[in-house]
Amino acid sequence: AEDENVIYIVSDGLESCGGDPKKAAEELHQSNVKAVVNIIGLNLKTPEKNALEQIAQAGGGKYLEVQTADDLERQLQEANAELWLKWKNWGAISQVDIRNQWSKKYMELVTTSESSLKKIIREHDRQAKALLYLMNQKKVSDKAYNDATNLANKRYEMISAKINNTRDKKETQFTNLRKIMEQRISEDTKKMQEKLQK
């Protein structure tokens, strides 16, 4: 979902600033600010309501009507509660998204590591079979066989250790990044919810 900036404009219906408020609301809504313009009308007549409804619609928002200051306070509290809930939902959805991304990256890492390990195991097995064949055919001495086998084993151990170490480092990096992102999301959500509760 795209980020949105929600704007509430309270109006008594008297236009005293000049300009084209409908066009301004539309431009603001379509700009990089991605603003949603909501308008609250305070005790208005029908023509004024209609004009403000059109401005709210052009701004991608909605028109609400109140008759008294108490109604206005209640409406603003409801808007605050709605924003609070949206922030809570954003936090929860974002946390799930981060975990899903981590799981996907982790599975890619495991798959790549397993594939690399299978290749080095296959290579080691072929070397062992080739050396055994040469030994049985009396093509190499016992010492040459033992030396070559030791070299093949060292190569296998070195490469498989490198694959495992690389996988472990990458997993640690992914996990640390996930934790940082989860903490940031949690902090941002908490800050905004605290602001909206004031």
Image (cartoon, rainbow, N blue to C red):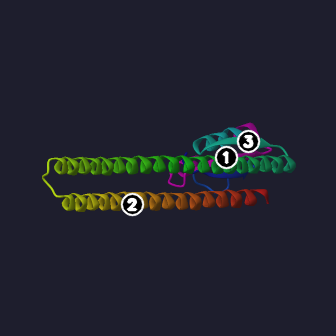
Q: Is residue 2 above or below residue 174?
A: above
Residue drawn at point x = 72 percent, y = 47 percent = 85
Mark 1 residue crowding within 10 angstroms, few (<14) / some (14–19) / many (20+): few
Residue 89 image label: 1
Q: In the image, 194: left or right of 68?
A: left
Which element carries disc 3, helix, strand or loop?
strand
The percent coordinates of residue 102 (x first, y second) are 52, 51
Q: Are marks 2 and 3 in contact (CB under 8 Å)?
A: no
Q: Which residues are magenta?
A: 22-48
Instruction: Please state which amino acid type lies under the numbered disc 2.
Output: Ala
Evaluate whether residue 21 shows in this view.
Answer: no
* Disc 3 from disc 1: Cα separation: 24 Å
Say which of marks 1 and 2 sits in front: 2
Instruction: Please state which amino acid type lies under the numbered disc 1.
Output: Asn
Q: In the image, 190: left or right of 118?
A: right
The percent coordinates of residue 78 (x first, y second) are 78, 46
Residue 161 image label: 2
Q: In the image, 177: left or right of 74?
A: left
